[in-house]
Every structure is written in structure tokens, then in C-alpha cells.
Image: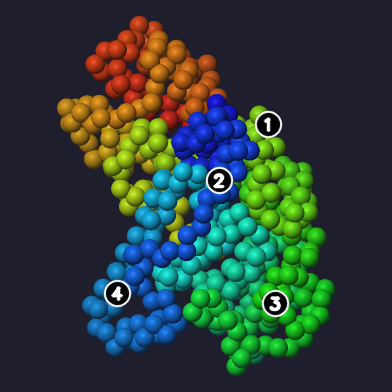
Amino acid sequence: MNKSALWSLRLGFSNKENKKISQQGLPSFLNESFKVSFSDAIPDFLSDSPRTTASLKEARKKLKVSSKQEQQEKRKADNLVSESMKQWWIDRMITAEYPLQEKMTLMLHNHFVATFQKVRVNHWVFQHNQICRKNAFGNYKTLTKEMVKSNAMVRYLDNSQNKKGRINENLSRELLELFTLGIGNYSEDDIKNGAKGLAGLNYDDDQASYQKQTQDDSVISYLGKKGVFKADDIVDIIFEQKNIPYRMTRKILQWFIYDNPDESLVTYYGDYFRKVNFEFQPLLVKIFTEEYEKDNAGSKIKNAVEYNLQLLDELQIENIKSATIANFLKQQSMDLFNQANVKGWEGGKSWLTTQIFLQRATLADAYCQGRAFSKKAMNAKEAMKRANDIELKWEKGDNKTIIAALTDRLLFNVSPESQKDFETLLRHDFDPNIPNANQAVLRLFNTIVKEPEFQLI
């Protein structure tokens, strides 16, 4: 596979950045990616969603005295706002001039999970997403502190129920197990004592804050230190631990490059991460520039976002609604803002179940016919008309030239058997100037993207 095309997919969601990486070089491309600004603007679809604890209490008070029909309508309205948020994010992924910020945001969204299904407050879910985006190229420790005190996380992991004398360990446990150190690097006592330090941390307007009547100010022992520790103190102590860098560096390597990264790489980059005080930007530069020089294509299975947006870009389709893409992602078990559990999307081979693979093939058929994801059949005349409207990017030439150009940007490897199949489909006497040439190349494209190798980057 063309290296620029490969890294366009790894650092974004499609082949769109291929030319930039090729012309600018990877270091310059990364520098431009890091310059992407962060906007704290609140989208219009959230205009009627409660933003303060007072407005939220008022809304809930009204809901309690509402009829069942009114309650159902309110839930439906909240669900529609959540769907609008998915579409808003998908549009950002598609239109971003340098999409690395959104790709990193998506990774962090899947690391610090807090779902709409549990949180049920759209503004808090949006805040959670914005925390990921704002810190995408920032500091891991700072991000962790903000996440622990986010209303969405406090709600999702039940810390509102964590009170002095009635401890709930959920947030304390996942902070250690999933968000930072990983299993084996702490004790059950650390979880219990950490929960005491987090007791009383409850919802507030912009972020969670401690409530005096429910916080626990007792002296605790936490990861070898004793004192009266609160959220920021707890995170600071965690980040002093020997194994703190490795869980995150493993996650980054898995998200961008390797489904199964070598542990020596995890350690190597993790040690550097500690050296640069847990700043994401220098870590990403080091990982991407050093791994770029290696022959490592085909080391990761595409997730549903990468698969879908790559097809849209290749076929230059612009009339597919983001709501349709969001629905496809949900069917592929990659529902934005709604992971199945706190561990997030598993990734790797979980993206290639029989059902998911068949859905991807159905999507390829649909897009190559210029329509949305659907099994609905079209008559031959309509199918030809739609196919002729697709502007697949391909170079004119003989069959081998066309096949080589397409496979160079689509497949990390082409077996002799596949090459023979492609040449049978687009024969040696193929004339690229005939009226139906584009349709013939589209059939070739559709065949190529159903190859198992197309699932890999």
C-alpha cells in the first residue's frame, strides 16, 4: 500500500490526507494538525438542553408531574438531541481539514467512557466530548483530572451515590483499572480508600464539586501515601506510579497502528511519555514519525468509522446523510456516545464478526450504486444511472495500470489469486474511453473493497 495513503487512514478516516502527507512530509503534516484550534461554541441543537444544576432540577421537577405521554415525548426529544450530537460529530470527522484532532478525540472518548444511555443529560455528554477534544494534544494528567470531575463521569460511574459512611467504589475502581494504571498495579484497599477521597464529589454547573455534608475528610492510605486526599491529589499520586505511562501508550498504539503492539514498544514509548511529563503532542510525534519508517501495513483492523468514511471519500459521495452513517455505526457495534460497557469498544477482531463483515459488504454495494446503506434493490436502469453519477478517482490506462493504481491506495497486500481475479473482471482489452468505463471500474472497486485485506490498515 502507498505509505501516504496508509498514514492518511491512520491519522484520519480516509484517503483525503494522502496528498498532504506526500507533499508536506509527515512532520509538517503533524505540525499543521496540532495547530487546529479548539472551539468552545455550543451547537444549536443543545439550545433547549439544561446546562446548570438549577435548570436540570427544574426540568426534572416538571417531568415528575407530567403525564406519561409528556414524559415519553421528553425522552424522545432528548434522544433526538443525542442523535443530532452524533451527526454533528460525524460531520466534523468528514469535513476536518486535518482530522487528527477528531481521531484522537474518538480514541479518548473510548478510553474515558461515559454513555448517553446512562448519563441522560445531553449537555454533560457534550461537555465530556469537549474535554476529550480540548486535551487531545494536551496533557494526560490534566485530562484525567478534568474527566474525574466531569458531571458525565460522576453520573456514569455513580459517584453521586458515593458519600461518607456509604461508599460507592465505581469511579475509584475504574480510575485505576481502566483510565490509568491497569489491573495488577494497585490493591483493593487503594480502591476503597480512593473512594473515600472521592466521596461527596457531585454534580455542579460546569464540573463536579465536593459537597461538605457528604465528603469524607478522614486520613487515608493511597498507593503508599497517607493524608487527606481529594480528586486532584489522588490523580497526582497515581501519576507518580512506575507503570502509569504504559496503559495509555498501549491504547494509542492500538488505536492508530497495531491491534497487538509489541510490549517492548509499549515500554519504549511509555518511558518517553513519562520523560515529556505526559504530554500527548510530543508522544504522538515520536510514535508516528518512528513507526512511519517501518514496514507495518496491515497491522490493524479498520473500525466502522474508518471503513465508512474511506468509502465515501474514494467514491466522492457527498449526499449521504450523517444520520445514515450514525445508524450504520450503531449496527456495527460502534454507536457513538453509547459503548456497550465502561471498557469501551474492544476493537481488533471484534470488528470482523460475520455480521459486521456482511454489513460492510452491503454498504460497499450500496455506495457503489450511489445510495445509502440499504438492502433495497433497484432496477437495472436506476442502478446504472446512479453508478454513472459516482466519480470514482481512477487513472486511465490499460487494465493492469488501473488495477495497480486502485490497489496501491486500497490494499496493503495483493495476492496472486486476487490479482488474477481483478484482471478477469477488468480484461486486458478494456477500453477506458468507452461510455460505461466508469461503471466497469466501479465493479472492480467494489470487488477490491470486499477483499479481506481491505479491512486492514
Within-10-Å neighbours for mark 2: few <14, some 14–19, many 20+: some
**Secondary element at image label 3:** helix
Within-10-Å neighbours for mark 1: few <14, some 14–19, many 20+: few
Q: Amino acid at mark 3?
A: Gly
Lower position in the chain sequence, tag 3 or tag 1: 3
What percent of the width, then of the height, locates residue 213?
60, 93
Lower position in the chain sequence, tag 3 or tag 4: 4
Q: CA distance from mark 3 to mark 1?
A: 42 Å
In this rendering, position of residue 418 left or right of residue 374: right
Q: Amino acid at mark 1?
A: Lys
Q: At 63% across and 38% down in the image, what residue appears?
A: 27
Using the image, determine if residue 10 lies above or below residue 112.
above
Q: Which residue is mark 3?
A: 194
Lower position in the chain sequence, tag 2 or tag 1: 2
Q: Which residue is mark 2?
A: 33
Q: Which residue is mark 4?
A: 74
> Which dot marks residue 4?
none
Q: Amino acid at mark 2?
A: Ser
**Secondary element at image label 4:** helix
Q: At 23% across and 40% down in the image, what residue appears?
A: 376
| Residue 192 seen from this side | no
Q: Which residue is mark 1?
A: 294
Q: CA distance from mark 4 to mark 2?
A: 40 Å
In front of the other: 457 or 312: 312
